Each structure stands twice: as C-alpha cells, then as structure tokens.
Image (spheres, helix red, strand yellow):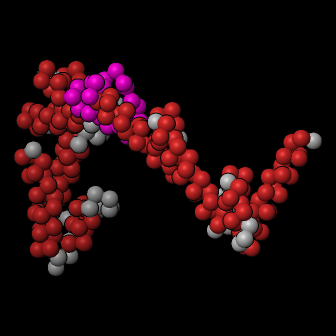
Amino acid sequence: MRLMARIFIVAMCALPCEARAQSQSPHSQAFASCLDEFSPCDHAALTPQQQQTVERVARDRKLLSCLNGFSDCNVKQWSAEQQQDIRRAKRDRNFTNCIEGLSLCDATGFSAEERQWIAEAARVHNFQSCLDATGDCDQKLLSATDKAWVANANHDRALQNCLEEIGECDQSLLSSEERQEVARANRDDNLRNCVEGSDLCDPTRLEPEQREELSNAPEVRSAATTKTTDIGDLKSKKEN
C-alpha cells in the first residue's frame, strides 16, 4: 500500500508541478503530451531531465497496472519487493471478491479464519436475497430465525401487492381476515375508478347499490355504460 501511495503522489503532484515549472520552456508542450498517457509523445523534443521523468511515469503506470490486476502486467520485470506487493494486491482483490460473493472468488488460498469470514458473508448475502425476494435464495443456508424473518417479509410483500393490486398477489400467504381486507380494498379501488371515469373501472365488480348510486352521476353513467356494453359484446362473441 505504501508503494501505491508513492506512485499516486508522483503521478498526481510531482509531475504536474514540474510541468508548470517548465511552462515557459519550448519543450513544455511536448513534455506535457508525453506525460499524458493517451497523447502522442515526441521524445526527441524532450530535455534529458524530461525524458527521465517521462520514463519514470511510464514505469509507475505499468506497476500500477500490475497492482490493479490488469492482464498486460509482466510481473517478472519488477523487483522482489514489488512482486510481493503485486501478489498481496491480487490476494486482497480476491478476498474482496469472495466477501462480496462474486464469481471471481477463489477461496483455496485463504486461512481457516478467512474462510469462515467468507462463509459468513455468503450467508448474509443469501439471507438478504431471500428477504428481498431478489437473486438466488438458498433456503438450506437459512437458520430457523432467518426463515421466520423471510416468511414475515414474504407475507408483508404479498399483503401489500394484493392491497395495491400490483406485482404478484399470493393470497395463500394471507389469513382469512386479510383476504377479506384485500377484497374490500379492491372493491373500493374499483368504485373509485368508476367514479373518476377511469379505464380501470370494471362495472361487473360493482355492488347493486353502487351501480344505483353511480347511475345518478351522468358522466359516470356514460363511462360505466360504455364499459358494460364492451363487456357484453365480448361475451356475445365468445358465445357465438
């Protein structure tokens, strides 16, 4: 980590300062281009000191590329200490992948304690997936307490979906009283849609007293009549 910090300081501070110091030099524009990784570099236009700086920056970039695990890294070109830093960075990156549950995880090189941490992280990720009903949920990894939490979450999600008539409504998870509450809420929502003249209005679901009440509102009566006529036409077509 100290090595990465040193590279960052050189790349982000020392070189820009040096470039500004030479901003009045005829070589400054070429020097700035060579310091930019993605700009063309005219090495012939550089002073010997600038050339050394550009080479050092390019070497630091290569080392940073190795520390970040890029495929173009040639580990053998570095010193023993730098190779150790590269291996440590690779191990840390792999451990992070395992903790986060990524498919790039290779847990074979970790200690027993580290594997316990990874297993606990996997259990937490699985529990969250089961709780949110997202991703893969392995019920076998859940404890009795976890299963109770997941069952409550599934129940609450089903109740909300049924009440709001959105998503998947699994009424088998609801109690008899909750199913009655859902039916009442759905009837109220349908009545409101009919009163407002919404296309979501289903006149066939209205109670007789609701139909009679709505028949006194001309704008609602027109919408409800049209809807009822459309439904009747569909039934006639099916019968024919």
Image quadrant occupied by the C terminus = top right
Task: Say whether residue 162 is magenta.
Answer: no
Task: Give the left or right position of residue 132, taking residue 55 as reference.
Answer: right
Give the camera-side residue of 13 and 115: 115
> Relative to 11, does residue 67 appear above or below in the rendering?
above
Q: Residue at x 84, y 46 (%)?
A: 235
Q: Which residues are magenta?
A: 119-145
| Residue 102 visible in the snapshot | no
Q: Residue furthest bottom?
A: 24
Magenta stretch prevailing secondary structure:
helix
Give the camera-side residue of 215 and 64: 215
Residue 43, horizontal then vertical, whole percent: 24, 60
Q: Residue furthest front?
A: 209
Give the camera-side residue of 72 and 211: 211
Residue 13, horizontal then vertical, whole percent: 12, 64
Disc tally is 0
Image quadrant occupied by the N terminus = top left
Task: Say whether residue 126 is magenta.
Answer: yes
Residue 195, horizontal then vertical, whole percent: 65, 66
Q: Residue at x 79, y 63 (%)?
A: 225
Q: Residue at x 17, y 54 (%)?
A: 57
Give the camera-side residue of 155 and 16: 155
Report which quarter residue 115 is drawn in. top left
| Residue 143 visible in the snapshot | yes
> Relative to 126, does residue 13 appear above or below in the rendering?
below
